[in-house]
Image: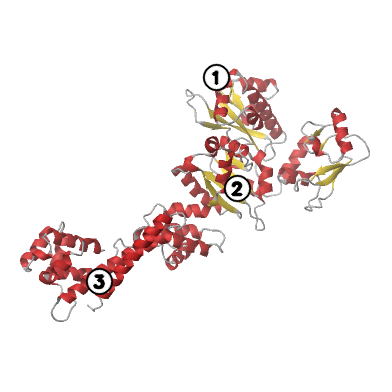
């Protein structure tokens, strides 16, 4: 019996005793029995789906039975598919390889087929990688690998972790691995095809990796199919990370580092944690989060999603969790927003866990311990929430223009949410985050669903013929045409009450001319204000306002001036109140208690002022 089978695998004491006494009489690799003593009894085999229960029996080397706990059953192929999360073809290939059978692939069906290594070629390439793993692992203990051991130690990984994850070291030699593998019977063509070696300019065969720390990259079945190599020395002019090139067995867009360690826990817990580096995977696993995996030299994409869907059983009837972990810096945020685009390919829910202080999981574990890594993942938030928050954070939500533009950018994200039942709720949430009414936000989402592009809003805060714009013009006309009546009342109302930038410029010019209180009116006063205008547009507007009729029947009196200026201030105050309400609406009263109370007090004061102005402006223009 092989040493990879623990003694507690056996449920029957007599079987466990025979296992100890007759270890060399038979051999077992994984769950496959190659030989067994003839003792007239059957052996129980654990169910690959339900932990701690036996489902199958092995009698005469035939695996049969059904699990009473989950109902799973079938033959050896089905068992391997469930236990190792392999496809049917992969399971057949694995069994054929163990049995020494030659497979022939039918390519005459007319359907397009995925390119596959030739018969026997895949086994040779995998065997070469398995031999390379042993070679590199032995080199990690050599004197020349001191830098590699220090690299691991500085990140909290000792000898046990290095052995667990198969870490190795490529020695300071041009062809040490090539010579070693050639002695083991591998041809130069096989080593080149495997990506382990490459031809030199001289025509000889040299190693692909040199003076680097290595991690073996395994496929879903546990076979080593490539390596990831990290630069250690300053005089190495190569890239920081170097991976195996594309080969018949290594496709970086299909590979996830750590999947061999994580696959059972991913299937068991119904979630996968996506990190960015090899040491991040190790840190998460060592910290008690065994579902972590990482891409290998490429962004997380469509093919990686297909790998995880097999483990998560991601379908209409089952929803797993995908948790992305990214640094909190700009690059990490950008990567998270890219991940949102791929989110729609999952039926399951997707989340993001952002590490504090821009630390990756490995750094976080070193700085704050294992619990901090688990807490970071536990504090995950839905990816769509993160994407919306990051999108609207780029705009000044204290301005009308900022809120409208943020709505335009965020509405398509809500429209992309695959669960249509959630869209109205996220539209409502977006409206709250922006401090806007629901109706315009819902319209923006509906337009995005129809593929309509919204037109940009005018930059002016008020339309040319809006009531507030007319009041602003009327106040300036009073200052130019009736300065004696407007006098101190006009001067007391500052330029900040004018929403239109051109009208605001004219108000500033009046102040620069000495103010209305200093004028007695007439052509001299108009010319003085016009001369203070910074541009021709303002000068033309002054001339226009100086002759435009006032909206009053009969003579202008102080009451009319008072009402006009009250309405001017009331309109400006209404805009301030609306902006402040939007800000208060966006605040969390629990997390931002002090700021919330301060703004609420300010809002109450402004509303009292607005009420007084409305009472003051009770007349008609």
User: 275 or 231: nearer the eye?
Assistant: 275
Residue with the mark numbered 2: 305
Q: Is residue 412 above or below residue 51?
A: below
Question: Disc 2 vs disc 1: which is toward the camera?
Answer: 2
Mark 2 nearby-residue class (10 Å; few <14, some 14–19, many ≥20) = some
> Does the rendering let one see residue 257?
no
Tell me how far mark 2 sits from mark 3, CA to CA: 60 Å
Residue 445 location in percent, x, y?
47, 63
Q: Whole-percent x and y of residue 447?
A: 45, 64
Q: Nearer the viewer, mark 2 or mark 3?
A: 3
The residue under label 1 is 202
Q: What residue did someone put label 3 on?
A: 567
Which quadrant: the C terminus? Answer: bottom left
Q: Residue 591: tell me if it is visible.
A: yes
- Disc 3 packing (10 Å; few <14; some 14–19; many ≥20): many
Q: Nearer the viewer, residue 183 or 455?
A: 455
């Amino acid at each position: 019996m092989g040493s990879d089978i623990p003694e507690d695998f056996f449920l029957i004491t007599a079987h466990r005793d025979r296992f100890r006494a007759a270890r060399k009489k038979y051999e077992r690799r994984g769950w496959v029995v190659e030989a067994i003593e003839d003792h007239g009894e059957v052996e129980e085999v654990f169910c690959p789906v339900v932990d701690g229960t036996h489902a199958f029996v092995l009698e005469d080397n035939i695996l049969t039975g059904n699990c009473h706990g989950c109902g799973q059953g079938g033959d050896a192929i089905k068992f391997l598919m469930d236990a190792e999360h392999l496809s049917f073809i992969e399971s057949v290939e694995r069994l054929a390889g163990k049995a020494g059978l030659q497979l022939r692939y039918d390519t005459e069906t007319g359907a397009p087929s995925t390119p596959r290594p030739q018969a026997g070629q895949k086994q040779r390439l995998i065997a070469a990688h398995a031999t390379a793993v042993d070679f590199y692992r032995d080199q990690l203990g050599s004197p020349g690998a001191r830098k590699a051991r220090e690299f691991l130690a500085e990140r909290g990984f000792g000898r046990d972790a290095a052995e667990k994850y198969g870490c190795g070291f490529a020695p300071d030699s041009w062809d040490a691995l090539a010579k070693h593998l050639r002695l083991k019977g591998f041809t130069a063509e096989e080593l080149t095809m495997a990506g382990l070696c490459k031809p030199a300019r001289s025509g000889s065969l040299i190693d692909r990796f040199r003076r680097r720390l290595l991690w073996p990259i395994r496929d879903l079945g546990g076979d080593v199919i490539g390596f990831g190599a990290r630069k250690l020395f300053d005089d190495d002019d190569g890239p920081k990370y170097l991976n195996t090139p594309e080969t018949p067995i290594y496709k970086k867009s299909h590979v996830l580092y750590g999947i061999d360690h994580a696959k059972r826990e991913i299937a068991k817990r119904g979630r996968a944690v996506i990190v960015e580096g090899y040491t991040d995977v190790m840190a998460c696993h060592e910290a008690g989060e065994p579902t972590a995996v990482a891409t290998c030299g490429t962004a997380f994409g469509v093919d990686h999603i297909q790998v995880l869907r097999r483990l998560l059983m991601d379908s209409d009837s089952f929803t797993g969790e995908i948790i992305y972990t990214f640094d909190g810096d700009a690059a990490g945020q950008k990567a998270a927003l890219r991940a949102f685009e791929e989110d729609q390919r999952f039926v399951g829910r997707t989340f993001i866990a952002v590490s504090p202080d821009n630390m990756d999981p490995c750094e976080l574990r070193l700085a704050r311990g294992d619990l901090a890594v688990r807490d970071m993942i536990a504090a995950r938030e839905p990816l769509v929430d993160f994407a919306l928050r990051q999108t609207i954070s780029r705009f000044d939500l204290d301005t009308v223009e900022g809120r409208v533009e943020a709505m335009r950018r965020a509405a398509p994200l809500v429209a992309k949410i695959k669960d249509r039942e959630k869209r109205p709720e996220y539209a409502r949430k977006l409206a709250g985050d922006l401090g806007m009414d629901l109706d315009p936000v819902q319209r923006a989402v509906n337009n995005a669903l129809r593929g309509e592009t919204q037109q940009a809003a005018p930059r002016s805060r008020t339309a040319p013929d809006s009531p507030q714009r007319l009041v602003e013009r009327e106040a300036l006309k009073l200052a130019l045409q009736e300065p004696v009546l407007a006098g101190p009342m006009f001067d007391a109302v500052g330029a900040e009450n004018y929403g239109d930038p051109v009208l605001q410029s004219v108000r500033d010019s009046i102040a620069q001319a000495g103010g209305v209180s200093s004028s007695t009116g007439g052509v001299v006063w108009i010319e003085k204000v016009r001369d203070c205008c910074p541009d021709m547009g303002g000068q033309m507007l002054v001339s226009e306002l100086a002759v435009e009729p006032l909206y009053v029947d009969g003579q202008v009196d102080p009451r009319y001036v008072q009402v006009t200026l009250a309405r001017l201030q009331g309109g400006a105050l209404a805009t301030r109140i609306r902006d402040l309400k939007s800000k208060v609406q966006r605040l969390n009263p629990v997390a931002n208690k002090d700021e919330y109370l301060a703004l609420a007090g300010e809002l109450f004061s402004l509303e009292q002022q607005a009420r007084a102005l409305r009472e003051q402006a009770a007349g008609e223009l």
